[in-house]
Amino acid sequence: MAKEKTYFFCQECGYESAKWLGKCPNCGNWNTFAEELAPQKAKNTKAAHLPSVPAKKLTEIDFSEDNRIDTGIAELNRVLGGGLVHGELVLLAGDPGIGKSTLTLQLVATVKLSQTIMYISGEESVGQIKMRAERLGIDKSELLLLCENDMNVITNEIKRYQPKLIILDSIQTVYLPEITSAPGSVSQLRECTNKVMQWAKGWGIATILVGHVTKDGAVAGPRVLEHMVDAVLFFEGERHYQHRVLRSLKNRFGSTNEIGIFEMAEKGLEEVKNPSEAFLSERPLDTAGTIVVPCMEGSRPLLIEVQALVTPSFFGQPRRMTTGCDFNRVTMLMAVLEKRLGLQLSNQDAYVNIVGGLRVDEPAIDLAIAAAIASSFRERAVYRDVVVLGEIGLTGELRQVNHLQRRLSEAEKMGFAKAIVPAGNLPKNHQLAIEIITAKNISEALSFILEG
Ligand code: TYD
Ligand code: MG
C-alpha cells in the first residue's frame, strides 16, 4: 500500500514544509511543527479562482451601523462592538463547561432577527438541546436544530433553509469527508473553518463558531484559525465561581478591550448590570490588606478589590504569588516600597489577589497594590470609604492615570467618600461630591491611606 502523503506545518503561523523542522524559519518559534496528511487537490482548479462575489465599487456598498443584528444580550452586544454584523464569523472559545453552549442557546432565543436561525451541534443530541432549551425557557419557531458532524450534509441543509444566523457547536467535532484526518485535527479545523468562511462571506450569514481551548488556554488548533475569523471572543472564569467574563481578543468590527460580565444561575446566564456592586459584595471592612480601586475595562469603569497578605518567610527564598495581576509588576512595587519607604519586605512572603476572578493589567492599579501590601505588612486597615488610584514610577512618584473623572464618578456612585489620586491629575471644574486628595509620591499617598 502506498504511504499517504503528509506534510508539516507550523502551528503558530501556518508555515508549511515538506520535512519536520525544529525551529520555524518564518516566525522563529521552536517545536511548533506538526504533521498532517496532505489535503487532496481539488479536481476543478479553474473554478476555485472565480470569485463567488463580484467586485463592487466602494461607494456602492451600503453598510451602516444599523446593519448590525441586536443579539438581545446587552453585554454580548458590547463585546461585539454593537451587535453581530451580517456575514461576520465569530469564534467563541472557552474551557469546557464554562457556558458556551448555554450562551449561544440564549442568544438564539433573544436575538432580534426574524429570519431562520440554525443551531448546529456536533456534540449533543437534539433531545439534550431541547432539554436545555426547556430549562432556559426557550421556544422559538424560527430556530432549526441540526445534530450533524459531516460538513457536506451541514452545507446542504444550510443551502436548503437559508438561515441568516448559524451557531456551530463546536468546530472541533465537525469534519469534511474529503480529508482523511480525524475531526479536531489541524487540517480538518482549517478546512472546515474555510468552508464556514465561505458560507459566512458568500451568503452573508452571521456565524458563531464554538471552539474549545487547550490546557494552556490557547484555542485548540493552530493560530491560523484565529487569523481566519473576524472576531475571537473568549469566555472565561473559574468554573466554581458564578462570574463569567466575555472578552474579545480580536474584533474586526469593534474594539478589543470591552468585556461583558455574566453570572451563571439556575436558569442560564444572567447579565451583571452593576459589576462594581457584584465585585465588592463580599468585601471585608476594616481589615488590613484590602483596598478598592476604580479601574477601566474598555470604556467602562469598574470598582475592584485588591487584597494582599504579607507574612514572615520561613525559607530562604521568600514566596511571591499573584492572581489576576502581573507578577513582575508586583515584584517591582515591592522593591519600590522597600527602597523608598524602608519597608522590610525582603524577608516576607507576599500574596496579591484581584478579587472576583478578574485580570487587570493597567498600571493605574499600582497604588492599590502597594497600599494593600503596606496595609497588610503594617497590620493597619485602610479607611473603608476610600479608593486609590495611580501608577507608581521607580522613584516612587505617582503618575497620572486616564479617564479620572469616569473612574471617580463610579466610586462616588458606589458610595465612596474619598479618593487619593496623583497630584496634577485633578479633573478640571469637575462636579464630583467625592473628596479628592492629591499625592505626589507613594509615601505621601500611603500616609493618607494608612494614617487617615
Ligand atoms: P455548557 O453551556 O454546556 O458549557 P460549554 O458548552 O462551555 O461546555 O454548560 C456549562 C455549565 O453550566 C454546566 O455544567 C451546567 C451549568 N448550567 C447552569 O448552572 N445553569 C443553567 O441554566 C445551565 C443551562 C447550565
Ligand atoms: Mg457545549
Image (cartoon, rainbow, N blue to C red):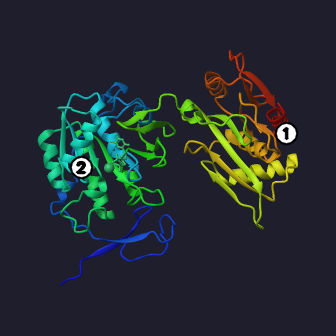
The structure residue drawn at horizontal position 67% and vertical position 35%, both measured from the top left corner, is 292
Where residue 396 appears, as percent x and y from the top left, is: 82, 43
Where residue 151 appears, as percent x and y from the top left, is: 20, 54
Question: Is residue 414 shown left or right of residue 88?
Answer: right
Tell me the tag on residue 121.
Answer: 2
Q: Secondary structure at mark 1?
A: helix
Q: Nearer the viewer, residue 240 or 220?
A: 240
Q: Amino acid under label 2?
A: Ser
- Calculate the distance from the C-alpha at mark 1 to the C-alpha at mark 2: 58 Å
Find out if the beta carbon at label 1 lies less than 8 Å from the nearest ligand 1 atom: no
Q: Dividing the picture into quarters, in which one does residue 251 lie?
A: top left
Q: Is residue 440 visible?
A: yes
Where residue 262 appears, as percent x and y from the top left, is: 44, 37
Tell me the tag on residue 443.
Answer: 1
Q: Nearer the viewer, residue 198 or 212?
A: 212
Quadrant of the image containing the C terminus: top right
Q: Amino acid under label 1?
A: Ser
Q: Nearer the viewer, residue 43 or 211?
A: 211
Q: Is residue 202 visible?
A: no
Q: In the figure, 175 relative to 290: above or below?
A: below
- Mark 1 or mark 2: whose residue is earlier in sequence: 2
Specify few, some or many for label 1: CA neighbours under 10 Å numbering under 14, 14-19, or 20 or more: some
Q: Point out the residue furthest to the left here.
A: 160
Q: Dividing the picture into quarters, in which one does residue 345 lie?
A: bottom right
Question: Is residue 15 shown left or right of residue 304?
Answer: left
